[in-house]
Amino acid sequence: MSREQAVEQLWQRRQRSKLVRFTIVLAVIATAWAWMFSDITFADLFTEQRVKNWNRFWTKDAVPDAPNGFGAWLGEQMSAYGYKALFATLAISVVAIFIAGASGLLLSFGAARTIGGLQPSRFSPVTRMICIVLRAIPEYVLAFLLLAIFGATAWPAILALAIHNAGILGRLGGEVVENLPSRPLQSLDALGASRSKLATNAVFPMGIARYLLYFFYRFETCVREATILGMLGVVSLGYYVVEARAHNDYDQMLLLICLGAVLVFVADVISDVARKLLQ
Amino acid sequence: MLATAPMSNRARILLSIAIASLAAYLYLGISVRELFPRGNGIQIVQQFAAAALGPEANTQNILMALLVTVKYAVAAITLAFALALPLSVIASSSFWSGCGITCHVLRWVVRSFIALMRSVHELLWAVLLLSAMGLSPISAVIAIAIPYAGTLAKVFSDIIDESSLKAENALNSIGASRWQKFFFGRLPQAIPDILSYAFYRFECALRSSAILGFFGFPTLGYYIKLEFDNLNYAKVWAYLYVLLAMVVVVEYYSMQLRRRFVA
């Protein structure tokens, strides 16, 4: 067989899937539509008005009004609202991820399609359905709806984050349970352990480390989302961002956005350290 | 493997979580009693729940909102993808293997830049761009694209670094240069995972795009807020159902796709 034939044979044997091809065509069409046949255009960035706005923003609006120097200004801003914004945001995300973690733990026992090769819970399909519905609605929309019910306390933000993440952690936890080693579970079952005994004495201790990895991964995103939920009126970082913008205090707004970035960065570090400790 | 993780660490982390949660709860000054809505809250719950069974649809508005939501998401993810690909190559350690200290400094700078892009939430980028430029479709697209490019670049660079060395070694043994090894040995292997992750982020972009409506862009979120503020709960449900269906359908599609794509 010549080299060309060998190459031809390899080419013939390549993996092919109709769905993948269809998706590629669809992606190309969608991209062309979004960029070439719609109102989205980069030219819009360079109209006279936009350039003027842009220049004014960065040379005037967003420049701190600091007669006593930047350090003094920063100190004032931080004690006026900066620390409050940071702590409130962090606290909201910690409470939320705690509730999500605990509920996700319960959901994951139910969501598993198999537990060590044993018969899964009768409610497995229902629980999986619940997980899908819980995570399908974005946190921001949930918080918006809950705000009307609970008023401007921290609860709408906490519950919105908790509901969304419980759905995600329930599904991921279910996968953890499915992937547990089956021997210990089967021998406990053979000894006559009840379902709840299996859950507390085998599934939980074997699966919790892996579950906690997911828990901290979700904590990161939780903090990130918590920074913006305040924009709805709950007192977190986003609330101060909206306030500053409403008063045209763009220097404060910019500072708050930077504080948000710092907070997310810190959460990343905390979560990284915790995950290293677990491995 | 994980079952043998040291008990002490695990216990310590569980304990820390409990303590931190309690401290956060006390700091916020909230109480569990507030979770039982009173007066006005109960009324809203009842009316809102009652409207769930009879969503009222203005088909034309819904279709428009859905189209705009998808359009922003497609534009944002393609822009993010185009930005992320070169960034991820520069941020990966395998690209710089056998290069000196200057390369590591450059890589570190790019990695920090990527971290900054994704540390700021897309809605905060949106607020910033709205303040600096004004309302325009391109500002919505850029607001989503910046943090998404950061996330994509980070994950892409991890995928590139984790791909198998076999092809690279084979190329090495026939005398390929450093660039050839990277671009013909390493990068091609990473492509399926890269595309599959990009598609997953498209799902997320759809949600982000819908939410940007709360800031005046004509996506699904715009109508959800508008109709809710006008107390048209039946219409709110119609948009919520469409949002839910969109998310679930794309998630299912993406699951099917990944099954065929990533062996």
Image: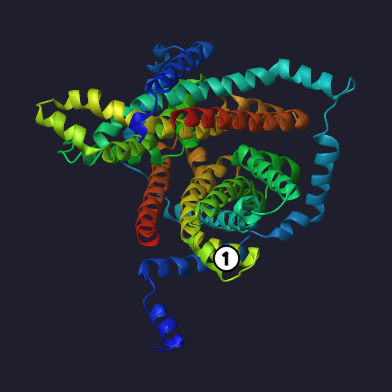
Residue lying farthest to the front in this orientation? B173
In which image quadrant can residue A85 be found?
Answer: top right
Horizontal side, residue B16 vs residue A65: left or right = left
Q: Can residue A2 be seen here?
A: yes
Q: Which chain letter matches label 1?
A: B
In which image quadrant can residue B42 be found?
Answer: top left
Please state, as top left, top right, bottom left or bottom right, where the C terminus of chain A lies in the image: top left
Q: Can residue B37 be seen here?
A: no
Instruction: Name the spot of residue B172 as percent of width and height, x first.
Output: 57, 65
For image coordinates 61% across by 46% down, the residue present is: B150
For image coordinates 35% across by 43% down, the residue present is: B55
The number of numbered discs placed on residues in the rendered structure image is 1
Q: Give above or below for B223 relative to A145.
A: below
For image coordinates 52% across by 39% down, the residue present is: B226
Kindly identify the amino acid type of the residue bearing the numbered disc 1.
Answer: Asn
In the image shown, does A47 or B5 lie closer to the viewer? B5
| Residue for badge 1 | B172
Horizontal side, residue A68 vs residue B235: left or right = right
